[in-house]
Amino acid sequence: MKNVIRVERAVLNISQAELAERVQVSRQTINAIELGKYVPSTTLAIKIARVFGKKVEDIFELDDDD
């Protein structure tokens, strides 16, 4: 699953740690999601999208393999 979390964080000028705090996970979880090593739960994906004021589909995109 692809995502644009890094880009959206840059737009808001927030760190991985700050995003993690806002959605109540560890910074390592945000890092793993950004790198595509971890697929977030639906709940977490919605929380992340809300931080950016976007729809989940604007943040996350399925790969051809998904």
Image (spheres, helix red, strand yellow):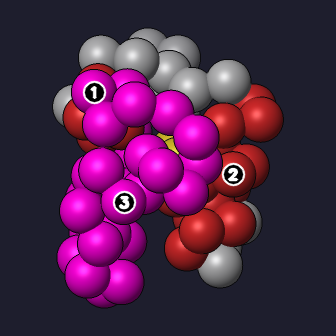
Q: Residue at x 55, y 73 (%)?
A: 52
* Residue 8 drawn at (x, y percent): 36, 71
Q: Amino acid at mark 3?
A: Glu
Q: Is residue 64 visible?
A: no
- Quarter location, residue 29: top left
Q: Position of residue 13 (x, y in %)?
A: 26, 81
Q: Residues within 10 Å of mark 2 (few under 14, many from 20)?
A: some
Would you name the residue on which mark 3 appears? Answer: 18
The amino acid on which the numbered mark 1 sits, given as a three-letter code, is Gln
Local secondary structure at mark 2: helix
Mark 3 or 2, closer to the camera: 3
* Residue on which the image places disc 2: 47
Residue 10: x %, y % from top left: 23, 76
Please tell me whether residue 35 is drawn above or below residue 5 in the rendered image: above
Magenta stretch, residue numbers: 2-29
Residue tagged 1: 28
Rendered residue at 65%/73% (across/down)? 54
**Real-space Cα separation, disc 2 to disc 1, in angstroms:** 16 Å
* Mark 3 vs 2: CB contact within 8 A: no
